[in-house]
Structures are given as structure tokens and as C-alpha cells.
Image (spheres, rainbow, N blue to C red):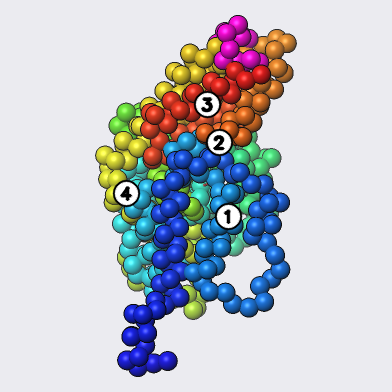
Amino acid sequence: MSGPLEGTFEQVRPSPTARALDEAARLAIDYLRGVADRPVGATAGAAELADRLGGPLPEGPTDPAAVVAELAAGADPGLVASAGPRYFGFVIGGSVPAAVGADWLTSAWDQNAGLYVASPAAAVVEDVAAGWVLELLGLPAGASVGFTTGATMANFTGLAAGRHALLATAGWDVERDGMAGAPPMHVVVGAERHATVDAALRYLGLGSGTARVVGVDAQGRMRADALAETLAGLDGPVLVCAQAGNVNTGAFDPIDEVCRLVRGHGPGGWVHVDGAFGLWAAASPARRHLVAGVEQADSWATDAHKWLNVPYDSGLAVVAYPAAHRAATGIAAAYLLPGQERERDSFNLVPEASRRARGFPVWAAIRSLGRSGIAELVERDCRLAARFAAGIDRLPGAEVLNEVVLNQVLVRFAPGAGTAGSAGAGAGAGTGAGVDGQDAATRAVAARLQAGGTLWAGTTTWRDMVALRLSVSGWCTTEADVDTALAAITAAAGAP
Ligand SMILES: *Cc1c(COP(=O)(O)O)cnc(C)c1O
């Protein structure tokens, strides 16, 4: 149908697109309105969800709005309320409202952010957001920034740039000739690096097993004296991976000292900092000291989908030397029409060509929070983590295992913790015959919390001890939420 009738028709009966988007907006708003009150964990298992959402391959079309409604209804009991205020698992933030709105537009606009000509708006917004991120994180203004899927690919990108630079200096073109026969280059990591650093080293052909592993202290921080010793024994250039924010304790490697030692290494070196969430400490005047010296590094990986609270997926790869960055991840083909000078072709900065315009929600989050709002978000989550730790300290038989310097709290429970007559706080954690009992008790507390639905937290193993991990990374968690969670933890710990 065409001509004037079409308009009339549209007014009476909205288009399938409009009805699908209206339905999605209604469902999304309802979901977020109720997210603080629903059970935090999923209430259905894989088999039930497969029943709800499975079935034979649809033979023909279904109305788009009905499809959206069917997906929402089917998925609901399998959703995890990580967008809400009492999700403390892994390191998972929610999404600030402006970022969700911008993310919806990103889908509607459906821009390919891979190259400038495919979306000048996406390219310029990324440039602007990149500049803001560098300023917030205290990184060099001239650094290049790639918008990756997450910190895993950001680690990959930073390490790829470092591999390029060190081998180019040694006269080797690693992009052309690969690693076989390359001059020696040593990878150095801390014993408490994140697992994705190993993944990145694997993808780069550097191997995760060949890295020199530097010892750490009780909080998981790389020991500077041990790094100095390691470097003294290496006669080639070094690619050193430091960490800002240990995924269990939140602790920071002594980055200033790491950079100083690597600068002093005769054959040359490159410092990459994995700061998936910890790098955001730089955005808070009260926590900035934790990343002192970070601007001296050569590359950095961080996430926007963790502490900046934008929707998945969103990471940032930052490299101090744009030429090394492009050499490592740039691509060229005759039909990939390059932008002019100052026109950003993002496919040169990430290990992807076509991709989502994830700069829009990053721009929106920073635009809506501003410098002070981001500082307050980081600081508030750290304060709430300290509130957790103080509450746990008052709970008989429960013990905080880490120095709570950031947003991470590790908790260990004695059997029957939380009840009168249980072991006092700190009694014997990690020693003697109680260790297995404490591991089991801690796992049991976590299982009860997960089933209870008031909050969600996972477990980890820290220095051979099972611990409950509490990560406060969301923008909407309040003191009242922490107190509600503490009451649930007290009950779960006291349960037989
Ligand atoms: C989460 C995390 C990663 C991996 O980030 P993704 O965004 O999940 O790819 C890497 N390093 C650290 C320290 C992390 O916390």
C-alpha cells in the first residue's frame, strides 16, 4: 500500500516496529520498576527455561510485538536481577538510566561502528567519550582508545600493542612473521593476575605457561622486590602485566614501582595494566592514591560495563602509542573505505571489524553522571563495601579475609556462625582441623543466600580458603540494601 492512505492507516494502526518497541519499552520499564523486589537469583533452572522458550523451529512468521512479549514472559524466571541493588556476584554493575536509553537507541539506529563512513556519529561520539575516559582515569591525553566487548579483549589489545612494540624494536615484524623464530621477549605476570590475561597471552601465541610469575603479598599484590629479582634474571625485553584491582580482594599492584622497575630494565619493556574495574579508582579523589603512577604504563584495559554501569558489552583498550595500537589491531581491505585524518576508523583499534556502536551508552553514562557523579558512584560503592565488612565483623563466627580497600569483601564462616556460642570472629580461620568445616560452612551460607533471593553472592577460593565474595559495583545500591543483605547473611550463617 502506498500514497496518502498509508499515513491514515499508520495513525489507526501503529506499524509492527512501533508496536514491538512500545511493548519492549513497557516490559523493560515494568522490569526495572520491580527489579529491587524480585528474587535476585534466577528461580527457574535450565530445563524449565528450555521448556518455556524452546519448541520446534517456528515454521512461519509471528507478530513482532507478540514475539517480544513471549520472550519476556518465557525468560522472566531465568533472569538474574543484576540490574538491581542487591546483586553482589562477580564484578557486575547495573546500568544507569541514560546508558540504558542510549543503548536502546543504539539498537534502533543499528550503526556499524567499525568505520567512519558507516557511522560518522558513532565515530565522533567514541572520540569524545574516549577523551572523557582518559581524563577521568588520569591517562595520557594522546593515548588511543578502542571500544571492545570487555576487558578480556582490552587485555588482548593492550598486550598485542606491547608485543608489537617490543618486537619491532628488536627488528621483528610480528604481524607479518608471527612468533616462530621471533627474538626473545619475556612475559611477566603477577601470581594473582586475572584469568583473562592468560587467555589473551594464549590468543597472542605468547603462551600462558611461559610467563614468568612474580610472587604476591597476602592481599594478592605483586611484590616489587620479587619483580626486581625476576627482571634482573632476564636479558631480553619484558612485557609486564600489572593489575589494578584484584578480582577477589580489590588490591592493587604497586604500579608506580612496577613502572619504575620496568623503565630501568636495560633491554626495554612495556607495562600493561589490567584495571577492569580497579582503574576507576582514579575517578574518585579519595581512592586515586591506589593507582598512583598508573599514567606511566604503556597500555591499560578496563571495562565500562562493570563500574561505569553501562549495559553489556563494553570494555576499553587504551594504548599510549597509537601507532603501536594500530599496528597490532589495524586491518585494511580495498572496500573498507578509510576515513580521512581525524575521522576515526574503529576497526583499527579493536580485534573486530563490524561491531555495535558501544560508544553511545558510554557517552551517555559519562554525560549524565559527570565527573562528580562518577566519583560519587565509585566512592559510594567503596563505602558500602566497608559497611558490609563492619557488619560482618560484628557477626560471631564470621571473618573478613581481606583489607577492604575498594569494593570487594571476602567473608569466611565458621560452622554455626551467627549464633551465640559459635566460634568468635577470626577464630581459627585457615588453621587447624576447622578448615574443612569452615569451607563447608561458607559454601552452605552461599547456597542458602542464593536460594533465599534477598541478595546474590558467589564463592571463591582465596589462599586455599573458601570465601563468600561480595562485590559492590552497582549504581543503585544503598545503605539500606546493604543492611537488608547483612540481615540475610546473619540469618543464613546462623541456620543449622
Ligand atoms: C572482569 C575482569 C576481566 C575480564 O573482563 P570482561 O569484561 O569480563 O572481559 C579482566 N580482569 C579483571 C581484573 C576483571 O575483573
Quarter assignment of residue 190: top right
Quarter assignment of residue 25: bottom left
Whether the magenta-drawn stretch holds residue 417 is answered as yes
The quadrant of the image that shows the N terminus is bottom left
Rounded to the nearest angstrom, the CA distance separating label 1 from label 4 is 31 Å
Q: Residue at x 44, y 46 (%)?
A: 34
Q: Residue at x 45, y 62 (%)?
A: 24
Q: Sequence-wise, which precedes: disc 2 or disc 4?
A: 4
The span picked out in magenta is 411-428
Label 2 sits on a secondary structure element that is loop
Whether the magenta-drawn stretch holds residue 251 is answered as no
Rounded to the nearest angstrom, the CA distance separating label 2 from label 3 is 9 Å
Q: State left or right for residue 453 relative to residue 290.
A: right
From the top left corner, tell me how far across and down residue 420 is, in percent. 57, 8
Q: Which of the labelled discs sits on residue 75, or is there none?
A: 1
Label 4 sits on a secondary structure element that is helix
